[in-house]
Amino acid sequence: MKHTIEVESETLLLLDGKCDAKTQDEIERLKSSIAIAKDSSLPEREAAMVVEIVSYARKNGRLTYQHVQIKRCPCCNRFDGYWPVRRSTRFKTKGNPDHDHPKVFSAIDLGRGFLTFPNFIFIGYCESCKPRVEPVLLPLIQDLKAEFPKHWEAAPHKWKRYDNQKCNGCGWVGHEGQMIHLHAIMGGTYPGQCPKCGAQNVFLGRRNIESIEGFTMVEQKPLTIAATPP
């Protein structure tokens, strides 16, 4: 039977080098957040979010940058409370906090995925702590092997992330960036053809090429423009 306990940072640091790999990983994150807080004057909670963001980008090969509305900031712990009940009912009294209607505010979601929860983010920060966090975060992601959205202009755009793929027809293994693009029904194109045997993933048809575990990072070469002769 496994048990989970919460310990203070100082207590956790006493286990440094004397624990299992998973606990040691948490200790290394704690040490990094303490160092960032000391060097940048960020509160330790916000420094911990910076460490979490860098770790997430390194593990997943990408970050998102989506503006959302949240009720509590995972970075600075901002919480604006609840709107008051407008009319008394059997279970609510006018003027009391309405726990079904929290006050929300703007934030940046850096770990947006397929599974989301209303007014909640795991990785990111609100507009209040953004001016403090981003100046510390941006230098730390400049050399990361990760993809960042183009509209996040301050982030580097050196790498492109592709999901790994396998062709069930010929056994080819590669990534989406190596596949041949096909025309989509609604316009545009998508990676849908095996570059080795020509098998295709057709809309509403059989999937001959399937996603497999992992991803591949491909370095983006800077675009060069030839000089026009005089």
Image (tube, grey):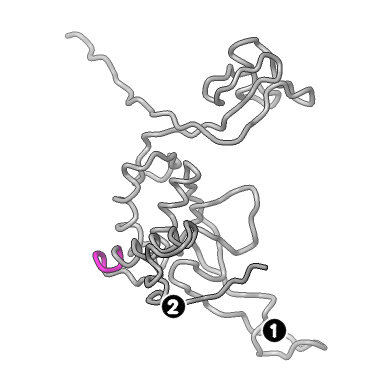
What residue is drawn where x is 70% and y is 90%? 94
Q: Position of residue 223 (x, y in %)?
A: 33, 23
- Disc 1 is placed on an element classified as loop
Picture quarter with the N terminus? bottom right
In the picture, measured across the screen, residue 112 lies left or right of residue 44, that is right
Picture quarter with the C terminus? top left
Q: Residues within 10 Å of mark 1 (few under 14, many from 20)?
A: few
What mark, if any, has residue 8 been given in the picture? Answer: 2
Q: Which residues are magenta?
A: 36-40
What residue is drawn where x is 56% and y is 36%? 214
What mark, if any, has residue 86 been given in the picture? Answer: 1
Give the answer, above or below, for where 164 lies relative to 56. above
Q: Quadrant of residue 189?
A: top right
Give the prevailing secondary structure in the magenta stretch: helix
Residues 90 and 205: in front is: 205
Looking at the rendered structure, the kind of residue marked 2 is: Glu
